[in-house]
Amino acid sequence: MTHHLLSFGHGFSAQALARLLLPRGWQITGTTRSPDKAAALSRTGIAAHVWPGCDLRDALQRATHLLISTAPDDTGDPVLAALADDIAKAAPHLAWVGYLSTTGVYGNHDGGWVDETTPLTPGTRRGRHRVLAESQWQALAAQTGLPLHIFRLAGIYGPGRGPFAKVRDGTARRIIKPDQVFSRIHADDIAQVLAASIDRPNPGAIYNLCDDDPAPPEDVIAHAAILLGLPVPPAVPFNEAEMTPMARSFYAESKRVDNTRIKTELGVTLLYPDYRSGLEALLRDDPDG
């Protein structure tokens, strides 16, 4: 049987998964909002569509697996808003559904640890949107038997998405906020967790996706500079830093995210268990990146 993944919002994380699945003979249909991005996806072997704007009901009926990476808004998940009835009809044919959420649903814990059982207390608008979208997908799963899996992603980095360019051009800053820590996850580790879940589905499961080493953001910038052999950017106190509202919102929450479940339930061994190994691999694979 040919496996067919229908991927809504086929972006950075979904593309990493596709690089694992395509060599295994999978068919992948992916959506994007941009015709240029659709053309680029098509060159990688993805059946790409610009959505909203096209009819995907036939692809949904043919899909064996469904991945949702689209960003929600005040009303919740846009895929459900457009296609909930069709997804409900397709539920008996789907072997696995993955919803990519965020660890932002946990809110601020002042550097304390959270796991999948921690109550959801989002402190940002984006976090609240994700809580709403998660609940909508869970409600549909309860009604239809949809084999839903929720993946709460920490800060994502990977090829082309790291600190090296800013360190090189001198725009990187080490913003210091006492006791601030973030968890992170390399895109290749996201892909291997998703692939492991596809191989070992457990409908209703929720997984935190992050590495083993929550760390202050300034430490990551400093290590990138050291790897490049460049001066470590100067420290800037958080209260004095010029930042966009979105960038500042990331500093409103500090927590350490526990990833035990992906190891015990899915048997995952992280490729990059900390930011140091992840950054070193990025620079090794693309010295100009």
Image (tube, rainbow, N blue to C red):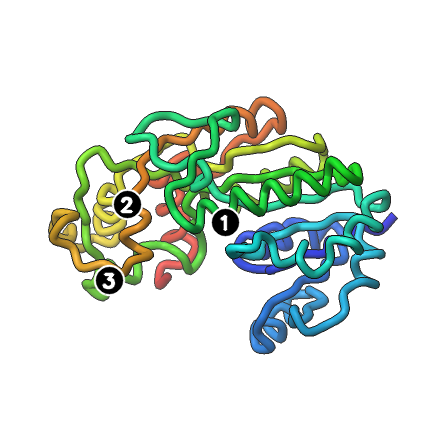
Residue displayed at 65% across by 72% down: 50
Q: Is residue 7 above or below residue 136?
A: below
Q: Is residue 173 left or right of residue 273?
A: left
Classify 10 Å Cα crowding around label 3: few (below 14), some (14-19), many (20 and above).
some
Residue type, mark 1 in image: His
Residue displayed at 66% across by 50% down: 67
C-alpha separation, residue under disc 3 versus residue under disc 1: 35 Å
Classify 10 Å Cα crowding around label 2: few (below 14), some (14-19), many (20 and above).
some
Residues at marks 2 and 1 touching, judged by CB atoms closer than 8 Å: no
Q: Nearer the viewer, residue 165 or 8?
A: 8
Tell which circle, 3 or 1, labels the residue nearer the N-terminal end: 1
On the image, the x and y values in percent for residue 51 come to 65, 69
Q: Is residue 171 above or below residue 40?
A: above
On the image, the x and y values in percent for residue 105 come to 46, 39
Q: Nearer the viewer, residue 264 or 95?
A: 95
Q: Nearer the viewer, residue 257 or 26?
A: 257
- In terms of secondary structure, where does tag 1 sit? helix
- In terms of secondary structure, where does tag 2 sit? loop
Report which residue position mark 3 lands on: 168
Tell which circle, 2 or 1, labels the residue nearer the N-terminal end: 1
Residue extending furthest toward the front: 75
Tell which circle, 3 or 2, labels the residue nearer the N-terminal end: 3
Residue type, mark 2 in image: Tyr
Report which residue position mark 1 lands on: 129
Q: Nearer the viewer, residue 164 or 137?
A: 137
On the image, the x and y values in percent for residue 157 come to 42, 50
Question: Which label belongs to residue 251?
Answer: 2
C-alpha separation, residue under disc 2 versus residue under disc 1: 18 Å
Residue extending furthest toward the right: 1
On the image, the x and y values in percent for residue 64 come to 80, 49
Residue type, mark 3 in image: Arg
